[in-house]
Image (tube, coloured by chain):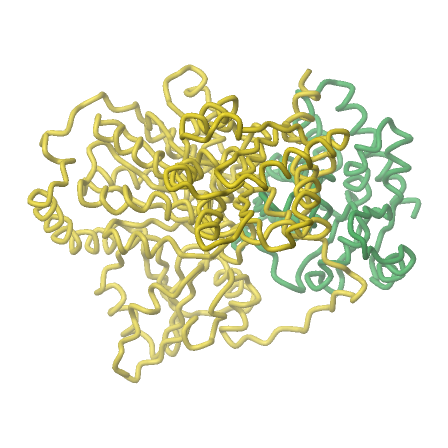
Chain colours: A yellow, B green
Amino acid sequence: MSKLVLLGDEAIAQGALDAGISGVYAYPGTPSTEITEYIQRSDLVRQGQVRAGWTANEKTALEAALGMSYAGKRTMACMKHVGLNVAADPFMNAAVTGINGGVLVVAADDPSMHSSQNEQDSRFYGKFAGIPVLEPSSQQEAYELTRYGFELSEKFRLPVMIRIPTRLAHSRSAVERSPTREQKPMAMPADPGQFVLLPALARKKYRLLLSVREKLEEESGTSGVNRVEQGNEKKRGVIACGLAYNYYREVAEKHRLAEPVLKISQYPVAPEMIRDFVGMVEEVIVLEEGYPLVEESLRGVLETGYVIRGRMDGTLPRDGELNPAIVAGALDLRREKPAAVPGVVKSRPPALCKGCGHADMFLALNEALAEYGPGRVFSDIGCYTLGALPPFNAINSCVDMGASVTMAKGASDAGLHPSVAVIGDSTFTHSGMTGLLDAVVDGSPVTVIISDNSVTGMTGGQKSHATGRLEEICGGLGVEKEHIRVIIPLRKNHDANVKVLKEELAYEGVSVIISDRECIQTAKKKVRKS
Amino acid sequence: MKKDIILAGVGGQGILSIAAVIGIAAVESGLHLKQAEVHGMSQRGGAVESHLRISDGPVHSDLIPEGECDMILSVEPMEALRHLSFLSTEGWVVTSSNPFKNIPDYPAEEVLIAEIRKVRNHILIDAEQIAAEHGSRKASNMVMLGAASAHLDVLPEKLEGAMRTLFERKGEEVVGMNIAAFRAGREAAVRG
């Protein structure tokens, strides 16, 4: 088989295609988006043999995947780490129902928050649910562990998580493929009650899940994914999880270190494997990309005297992603002081594109709100979050998908009027609709601005479920027709738009203003294509 | 052989195309490769970077260790300086002299140029001017790749072949323009 140069994301996608998936379900989110995009470009999707559409959100993605698994087929749901919070309900319960066709849940974590609101470590979700987690350290491993993940899933009848951080998701390297597998035929679950989590059945299923735990540990002890690399050093050993292994190898090669290494890429880890390894040396240092999951499991509440170093004792920073310099520092290696970056270098934060419709919307909103004073705009996750920065300084919150609408409702209930939500079209159909229904049913006066650019913009212009449907959705949820207004955010319409906004801000009920202009990047792409 | 290169610029200036060309050429030359890039929010007019590592042996870390980078290849002078802590003492800074001013406190150009000249090994190129002479300012990134090519340990023919692969679907005219820009950049760097 030929070698391909692939992003970590793409290696997972190719691995899943070669493992015979029948569908992938996902909502775009950095750094996970390229998995689904790669599958969408494949011949199998073009020929209609594999489903690869975007979903409304991560919860619907994972549920659809579970349905495909019910029907006996292999499938995958992909999301960024915070997307797993949205999908947490089906995620936790799918561990209890178990699967029929193999299911992989890919969680792409973003330590150091390059493009996220937090740096939660998805391995904890895997532990919480009690399912196996695979954490590749390279693009080749991402490919291989994806294929192995489906076997593992079907062997133990459980969903399996693949966890990758940004630096693997968005790094390219050569990947060697293995022979492809045919898709599985449709087949109903052998037990018709498998997916019925009535309490009496759920209790049985949960005990079954608990009983598998030891077998999962045994599996990770024998699969060869976790392995000990012997070294001559007797004092210190290194436990390197996922991507951290690469940074250790980088540093070890340069400084000719000869420590024994326990490389971990599969969880739950077999306790004997750790005990045997720890017994070989006097102290261990635990290198993990993310939270100290393994380190925490090694440290008891009672002091044992054994030296464990890692993120919890300050040997490594408690937050942020690792890199070779941090790992070298943790191993007490002396480094030359790097050259200083001249003070003349100024920070260059991201900004809204020239000609972006969000910008004209914010200018109009700022003017319309001037008479009420600042602090009234709840916003959301998308390019328009940049409205928090100068020159706009237009928004006062960005918490999670859909929170603009519901926070505006809560503040309005507390007496804030006007109370404004600014949300994108795709974010609105992801998680904003239900909040709008709350406001309508409860009669909370809020002004919801849907800044509609007809795509999921920040992740690169994926198809938005909202396109062409917003007025009908809002009307259907019960917003009065005369308070669903549409404006076109262009400079020439500024005064007219300010007038519409002022009218709706003054209205003491639920109103929606759809600010409708195509994403400038998507528009440019269309021009280039024609 | 091992080359660690940081590619720098502002979102939309085409550094990922430079990375793709070097990447294709490196793999065609039988070298190992890792190339880390940043996607998502940071692309919107913000500073962007890509760590590109090529070697005749396996490459471990996706990120280049601080102080060990062989070259900073930048399409913008201030962005070239942003990554100086990564440059090794013998490393090269190859950068365009054309500023991209999208922030209110962008520093004076002569101060930036003076800082770049302090780096022992540097190449400063007016990439936009050269690119314009060869068809389009958009090819500034390939001018910069050309300027850097003498220090890359990848044959220029391989790089041109990779450009052909990358730009093929955009038509022969685009391929020709980019290759011309690449050659002009290479010459300009040699002339000094």
* Residue A130 falls left or right of residue A37: left
Image position, residue A407 (x, y; %):
46, 50
* Residue A194 falls left or right of residue A435: left
Whether residue A14 is situated above or below residue A395 in the rendered picture = above
> In the image shown, does B126 or A486 lie closer to the viewer?
A486
In the rendered image, which quarter is residue A352 located in? Answer: top right
In the rendered image, which quarter is residue B138 located in? Answer: top right
Image position, residue A359 (x, y; %):
69, 40
Q: Name the residue located 22 percent from the left edge and 64 percent from the top edge.
A: A271
Visible in this render: residue B37? Answer: no
Whether residue A313 is situated above or below residue A79 in the rendered picture = below
Whether residue B51 is situated above or below residue A154 in the rendered picture = below
Image position, residue A154 (x, y; %):
21, 37
* Residue A400 falls left or right of residue B150: left
Image quadrant containing the C terminus of chain A? top right
Image quadrant containing the N terminus of chain A? top left
What is the number of callouts on the image? 0
Image position, residue B188 (x, y; %):
90, 41
Visible in this render: residue A394? Answer: yes
Q: Name the residue located 30 percent from the left edge and 40 percent from the top edge.
A: A148
* Residue A362 falls left or right of residue B114: left
